[in-house]
Image (cartoon, rainbow, N blue to C red):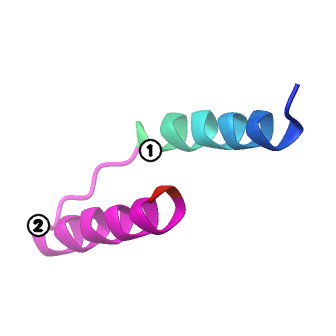
Amino acid sequence: MNVLQTHTDIVGDNSSYIRSFISIADPEIRKFHRELNEAVHHATCG
């Protein structure tokens, strides 16, 4: 069992759960949020 992978999986699951309740109404803020998430994803996964 890889403890660090388990931690990453749990944090990812919780993050997805919390995000499911959030809806950003402002299109500019929603675009910024999407771009920020993509940049963070690429920095951590790529």
Q: Residue furthest left?
A: 27
Residue 26 pos. (x, y %): 16, 67
Give amino acid for label 1: Arg
Residue 46 higher or lower than 19, as above or below? below
Mark 1 and mark 2: Cα distance apart in space:
17 Å
Residue 18 pos. (x, y %): 53, 42
Residue 2 pos. (x, y %): 85, 33
| 42 or 24, nearer to the observer | 42
Give amino acid for label 2: Pro
Residue 27 - label: 2
Is 39 a magenta residue? Answer: yes
Q: Main secondary structure of the magenta part?
A: helix
Residue 14 placement, left or right of 24: right
Tell me where residue 38 sits by quadrant.
bottom left
Residue 7 placement, left or right of 37: right
Tell me where residue 27 sits by quadrant.
bottom left
Q: Residue furthest front?
A: 46
Image marks 1 and 2: residues in contact by CB distance under 8 Å? no
Residue 4 - label: none
Is 33 a magenta residue? Answer: yes
| 15 or 27, nearer to the observer | 15
Q: Residue furthest top?
A: 1
Q: Residues within 10 Å of mark 2 (few under 14, many from 20)?
A: few
| Mark 2, secondary structure of its residue | helix
| Mark 1, secondary structure of its residue | helix
Q: Quadrant of the N terminus?
A: top right
Residue 5 pos. (x, y %): 75, 38
Residue 27 higher or lower than 13, as above or below? below
Magenta highlight range: 22-44
First along the sequence among labels 1 and 2: 1
| Residue behind mark 1 | 19
